[in-house]
Amino acid sequence: MKKVLTAVSLVALCATAASAEVKVGMITTLSGGGAGLGIDVRDGFMLAIAQSGRTDIDVVIEDDQRKPDIAVQLSDRMIQSERVDVMTGIIWSNLAMAVVPSAVNQDVVYLSPNAGPSALAGQGCHENYFNVAWQNDNLHEAAGAYANTADYANSFIMAPNYPAGQDALTGYKRMYEGELAGEVFTQLGQTDYAAEIAQIRASGADSVFFFLPGGMGISFLKQYANSGVDIPVVGPAFSFDQGILQAVGDAALNVVNTSQWNKDIDNATNAAFVDSFQAEYGRLPSLYASQGFDTANLLISALDKADPSDQDAFRDALRAADFDSTRGDFAFGPNQHPIQTIYAREVVKEGDVYTNKIIGVALENHSDAYASQCKM
């Protein structure tokens, strides 16, 4: 029996087709350790989509459980079965290294809202890969630059032993001009830092730089505060971000950390983002939420100019970065990683809420060390 389409059903059919015109695959961490980071990226991204009023962007969201094998399975399914046009969402660099090279080589554009491993910024750069957050070394480079201005001359440094951790210590050492009292790689997901704190105590250090994202940073800071070791610490925003500070509490007060974003960056887009995110979700946004928001707005700005099916035009539209960022001025370098200002922030308490305030600029209009190796 032949199905007859009425005018109403035709309209409905066209609306359905329009709503799925651009398909975005978001693979991020929504459960287990580090789930707060992925939830914030997702919520920032979806807030921007909602505010745009567009109905032609279909976002498929999956939980990678912070497991590379799960992330690869999800990516393969999204590309081969879901036929996504764009992918985004990954938080952790080891998962990015498992997913991104394969995705971009299958002609899918990948917009990173967080992970920025050095291997994808230099010789492994690709025309389909754009990082909207930072290259992994950047915030750590800024911490090293800050340490110089604070006259730290003998830092003890540590990070987890995975790509982002290796990039972290490389970045700090690139800018830091002093000596090293010690250099330690911890286990990814480690929760007991008694041995490392004992090493710090015995090292003669005048400062501690650490990169321990998510729950790792919470565990370390609490144990460090209770240890009686009175050596100042500095780090990147990842251990002092909005979602983490409430769990750390007083142990984080007055610590200086580095970030390309903060809620008090003075521009209209950022002020509106902070207000609308808090109104929608009942909490202050984090660094990760701002990155998700900016990633979605970059995508929307490109879709206003070109369809993903015209890949050259779509990539050109992404490179133009013609959107209002929460960070203010935003531009891509030649390897499609941001050129941006990175700030020094101090942890403060506003009423009952622990948060950060900007106290200065650590690096201005900063690119990354790997752009010259990119041969696009």
Image (spheres, rainbow, N blue to C red):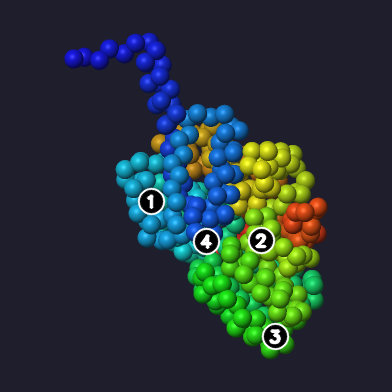
**Pointer 1 or 2: first along the chain:** 1
How far is mark 1 from mark 2, CA to CA? 32 Å
User: Dot 3: what SS?
Assistant: helix
State the separation of the CA atoms marked 4 and 1: 21 Å
The answer to whether residue 64 shows anywhere in this view is yes
Q: Name the residue carrying label 2.
A: 247
Q: Residue at x 57, y 60 (%)?
A: 135
310 versus 361 height, above or below: above
Q: What x and y, as percent, mark residue 228?
A: 74, 80
Q: Nearer the viewer, mark 4 or mark 1?
A: 4
Amino acid type shown at disc 2: Ala
**Residue type, mark 4 in image:** Gly
Residue at 45% in and 29% down: 19
104 left or right of 342 in image = left
Q: Earlier in the sequence, mark 3 or mark 2?
A: 3
SS assignment at label 4: loop
> What residue would you read off at disc 1?
75
Picture coordinates of residue 180, whole percent (x, y): 67, 83
Point out the frontmost of discs 3 and 1.
Answer: 3
Tag 1, which secondary structure? helix
Which mark is in front, 1 or 2?
Answer: 2
The reply to whether residue 116 is visible in this rendering is no
Q: What secondary structure is found at the residue carrying circle 2?
A: helix
- Compared to residue 143, the image places residue 102 above or below, namely above
Could you tell me the amino acid type at mark 1? Ser
Q: Quadrant of residue 259?
A: bottom right
Badge 2 vs badge 4, beta-carbon distance below 8 Å: no
Q: Which mark is residue 371?
A: none
Mark before the other along the chain sequence, 2 or 4? 4
> Which quadrant would residue 368 be assigned to in this image?
bottom right
Identify the residue under disc 3: 201
Q: Are marks 3 and 2 in contact (CB under 8 Å)?
A: no
